[in-house]
Amino acid sequence: MMEQYLALKREAGGSLLFYRMGDFFELFFEDAKIASEILDIALTSRGEHAGEPIAMCGVPVHSAEGYLARLIKAGQRVAIAEQVETPDEAKARAKREGKPSSKVLVARDIVRFVTAGTLTEEALLEPRRANVLVALAEVRGAIGIASCDISTGAMALEECTSQMLSAELARLHATEVIVPEGWEHVPDENVPHDRGAFSSDAGSERLCAVHGVATLDGFGEFSRAMLAAAGGLIGYLDHVGRGKLPLLLPPRLRANASSMAMDEATRGSLEILESQNGNRAGSLVAALDRCSTGAGSRLLAEDLSAPLLDLQLIEERLALVQFWRDRPIERANLRDVLRALPDIGRALGRIVAGRGSPRDLGQIRDGLGEAARIHDWLTREADRPPLLDALLPRLAGHGALIDLLACALVASPPTERGNGGYIAPGYDASLDELRDISGNARRAIAAMEARYRDETGIAALKIRHNGVLGYFIEVPSRHGDALMAADSGFTHRQTMKGAVRFNSLALHEEASRIAEAGGHALAAEDSHFEELVGEVHAAREKIAATAAALARLDVAAGNAERAAQGDWARPEIVDTAELEIVGGRHPVVEAALAKTGERFVANSCTLAPDDRLWLIGGPNMGGKSTFLRQNALIVVMAQAGCFVPANAARIGLVDRLFSRVGASDNLARGRSTFMVEMVETAAILAQATERSFVILDEVGRGTSTYDGLALAWAVVEAVHSRIACRCLFATHYHELARLADSCDSLSLHHVRAREWKGDLVLLHELAEGPADRSYGLAVAKLAGIPAPVVQRARQVLTKLEQARSETGGLAAGLGELPLFAAAAAPEPEQGPEDVLAERLRTTDLDALSPRDALDLLYELKRTLD
Ligand code: ADP
C-alpha cells in the first residue's frame, strides 16, 4: 500500500494527499502533521517506514467538506485520491494478472485537486466575495494577466508592465496566483506551474478548443503575453480538474488602464475591501453594501476595486442609481425580488464543472424565471436610463429553457442526485409507469401485511424493509414457531432477540418488482438529468449574461438604497483637475460613531489647479487621517459609479490614486517600517501624474526629526512643483508651513482644537491657516499619561522652546523667510485671571448651597495662588 501511496504523493506534489480508505480520507507522514495541526485532530502513528513510525490522521468522508474548507483557508492545497475500482473489480483484475487475490490493492487515482482558486462548492465559497484565480506570463517584457472566477466562469485577459504588476494584482485580489516555474517576477504568494503551458500558441489553441471556435478574433485582439497567461491558466485548471475543465466564458479583453490605478499599499490603507485586520467588517465595501444578492455584493466589490476612467460609463452607472433613487417603492420591490433569487451564476458554475445537482437546475429555472418577470416589469417603466435599456434584453430570452426545466423538475429538487425523485410526474410517461409499478407494489405489500395478519391471527405481524434483507415479514418470538412450519408458506430468514423474520414467495415477487422498477426509474431520471444539464450547458453564455445583468441591477438598487439611507449625493464627474467636495463624510468612521451616538463633523475640500496641495496640521486625534481618507474614498466611490457621502461633489477624473501612511502606523513586513514608508513614497514620486490624487499622512514620521522634516519637505516640494497633482498632506511638522511662501499652489489648513482649563477639546473641524500648536501634551493627558509625567514634559518643553527661539529652531536657515513660529502669532496663554473670570461667569450662584459657595471661594483662591 505504501508503494501506491508514495506514487500518488509524488503526483500530488506540494498538495496534501487525501488518501481514501473506506469511509475515511487518511493523511500520512508530513501531511498528517500539517493537517492535524490546522484541523486540531488527533495525530496517531502506524507501522513503520524507513525505520520511523508513520504519522497519520484522518477525516470522515461524509464531513470532509468542512475540513477541506479549513485547510484551504489555511493556505493548503489538497489532492483527493479516490478508489477507482470496487474490491470485486480488483479481485477480477488480480485473477487476470495471475496474482493471489488477497494481495491485490484497490486501484486509486487522484481525481481532483482542491485549491483556493478552483473551488465551486457552495459550502467552500464565500457568497459575497469573488473567488479569483490569476495566471501570469511574460512575453518580451510585457506581462500578461489571465484571471477567472470559475465559480461563475467570468474570465478576463489584460497586460501590464512589471512596474504596474503589483497594483494590478492588488486590484484583482486573487485567491491563487499561478506563475511559470522559475519565473523571476514572482509575487509573494504563488503557485508555480509547468512552463510549457505558458505559451501564446498553447493559449490560443486552448481558448479556441474551449469555445469551439477556429479563431479568437470574435472575442478581441489579444496580445501574445495575454494568450500565454491564458495558456497557463487553462493548463492549470486542466491539471487540477484532472482533465475536466470548469465553466469558462469567452475572455473579456481588459484595455490597458481602463480603471483607476491603486497599488496594494493604497488599497490597504484605504481599507477598500478589507479593514487593516483583514476582515470585511470595517471596510469601505461593508459600509456601502446594501445589495440583496451575493452576486451583487461581488460585483460591487469589483466596481470599487476598479473605479472607471471613462466619463460616459461612470455617468451610465450613476444614472441607473439615480433611477432607483427616485423610485423608492419600485426599489423596495426589486430588492425583495432579488433577495429571494438563487445565485444562478454559481449554480451554473457547478453544473458546467460536472458537480451540479438537481437543486442547481432548479435554481437556474427559478432564477431565469424571475429575471424574465423583472424584464417584463421594467420594460413598462418610463424614462429608462441607457444602462437599463442595455441590460433588459439580457434578462429575457430563456423561455424555452425555463419551460423545459419547469416541466421536468419537481418544485424543490434535492441536492442529492442518487435517490432520484427530482423529475416531475407527467414529464416522462415511461418514468411515471415505472413509478406506478413500484407504487402499486408498495400498496400490494401493505395489503399483503393486512392479509397475513388476518390469515395467521398475529396482530403484531409486520412487513418491514432494511438495507441488508430488503423486504421481510417480522413477528414477535413467541409467534415464531407458528410460521416455522414447513407448510406455512413462509421461509425463515433470521432470528433476532425478541423477533423472527421470514420471507414469502408473494412478498419476494412484489419486492423484486419494486427493486427492478426503482432501478429503471433511477436510470431514467439520471438520463433526464444529463439531458437537462446539456441544455443548460448549451445556454451557458446567455445564462451567465443574465446573472451579470441581475447583479448590475442589484448593485444600482443597493447603491440607491445606501444613498437614501445616508442622504448621499450624486457626484458630478468632470474632466478637469479639480476636486470639490462639500460637506464630505467618512462612511466607515461615520457609521462607527453613529453606533455610540456621536455625530460626525462634515468637512469640505476644494482643490483646484491653483490651490491643489493642502498641508494639514493640528493635534493628533484631531481628524487629519479621517479627512484625508474620506476624500480619497469619495473619489473611489464616485468613479465606481456610486453616490457619495457628501452634500455635493464635483470630481475631476483621477487616473491614479495613492495613499500613504507614515511608518509608525504600519506593521513591519520584514523591512524596517521606515524603509517601507520610503519605498512606497518613492513609488508615488515615480508614478503619479498631473491627473493623480495623492494623500500623504505623516510621511517622514518614521525617522529622526531632522531626517523626517527634511524628507517631508522635499516630498511636498516634488509633489507640488514636479508632479503638480492634487494632494492632501497631513503633518505635525509646523516648519513645513513655510513652504506656503515658496509654493504657489499650496495652502495651509488645520483641524481645530481648543485647550480649555488644561483639557483638550477636539472639534474635528477643518479650518484655513496653519495649526497654532501641536497640543501633544494635552493629547498625552487625554490618553491617561500620569499628571507628574505630563508636568515634567511641560518643563522640558519650555526649555526646548526657549532654545528654539534663541537659535531660530529646527527650520532655521531654510531660507530668508520669516520663521513660521514667528509668523503665526501664538494664541495668548490663559492667565489665572481668565480662568477665574470664566469660572465665575459659568457658575449659577443661586444653585449653590452655603457650603458649595465656601468651596468655590477656596477653589478660586487656589487658582490665583
Ligand atoms: P489624526 O489623524 O489627526 O490623528 P484621526 O483622523 O485618526 O486623527 O481621528 C481620530 C478620531 O477622531 C477618529 O477615530 C474618530 O473617532 C474621530 N474623528 C475624526 N474625524 C472626525 C469627524 N470629522 N467627526 C467626528 N469625529 C471624528
Image (cartoon, helix red, strand yellow):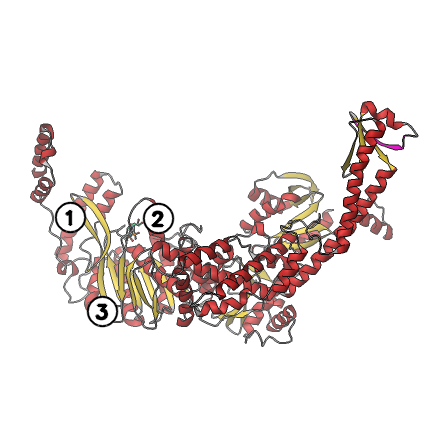
Label number found at residue 627: none
Give the quadrant of residue 331: bottom left
State the residue in front, 305 or 625.
305
Neighbours of disc 2 within 10 Å: few (<14), some (14-19), many (20+): some
State the residue in front, 367 or 242.
367
Say what amino acid the circle numbered 1 marks. Thr
The residue under label 3 is 743
Magenta segment includes 491: yes
Position of residue 818 relative to residue 438, above or below, is: below
Q: Is mark 2 within 8 Å of ligand 1?
A: yes
* First reached walking from the N terminus: tag 3 or tag 1: 3
Q: CA distance from mark 3 to mark 1?
A: 32 Å
Q: Which residues are magenta?
A: 488-496
Which marked residue is nearer to the observer: mark 3 or mark 2?
2
* First reached walking from the N terminus: tag 3 or tag 2: 2
Q: Quadrant of the C terminus?
A: top left
For mark 2, give the secondary structure: helix
Does any portion of residue 536 appear in the rendered image?
yes
Magenta segment includes 310: no
Q: In the visual, does 461 lie left or right of 534?
A: right
The residue under label 1 is 798
Say what amino acid the circle numbered 2 marks. Ala
Neighbours of disc 3 within 10 Å: few (<14), some (14-19), many (20+): some
State the residue in front, 14 or 92.
92
For mark 1, give the secondary structure: helix
The residue under label 2 is 592
Does any portion of residue 469 appear in the rendered image?
no
Give the quadrant of residue 164: bottom left
Q: Is mark 3 within 8 Å of ligand 1?
A: no
Q: CA distance from mark 2 to mark 1?
A: 38 Å
